[in-house]
Image: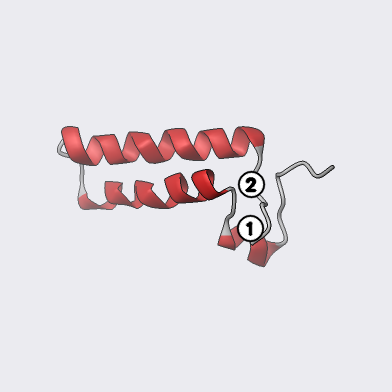
Amino acid sequence: MKANVGGVDRALRIIVGLALIAWALFGNGPMWAWLGMLPLATGLFSFCGAYSLLGVNTCKTN
């Protein structure tokens, strides 16, 4: 797996993922709020399968 999620994209995924999970845990959010696990995981691992299929890469390469 080659990293294809970089910088700002990665930070936003982690923030959104944590916010959705917190909503599900503490705010009596709907069941779909647990989908926050997906953006959190893609942000932490810097890899997005959908980006790979679509040929998108937001990670800067040296």
Q: Residue at x 59, y 48 (%)?
A: 46
Q: N-terminal of the two: label 2 or label 1?
A: 2
The image shows residue 30 at horizontal and vertical percentages of 20, 46
The image shows residue 39 at horizontal and vertical percentages of 46, 47
Label tally: 2
Check if mark 2's residue and mark 1's residue have beta carbons within 8 Å: yes
The quarter in which the N terminus is drawn is bottom right
Label 1: which secondary element:
helix
Q: Residue at x 67, y 51 (%)?
A: 4
| Label annotation for residue 16 | none
Tag 2 residue: 5
Q: Quadrant of residue 7?
A: top right
Q: Where 47 sits versus 52, above or below?
A: above
Residue type at mark 1: give it: Tyr
Answer left or right for 26 relative to 48: left
Residue type at mark 2: give it: Val
* Mark 2 vs mark 1: in front: 2
Q: Residue at x 21, y 51 (%)?
A: 31
Tag 1 residue: 51
Name the outermost residue toward the right: 62
Q: Where 11 sits versus 45, above or below?
A: above
- Mark 2 crowd level (few <14, some 14–19, many ≥20, 10 Å Cα): many
The quarter in which the C terminus is drawn is top right
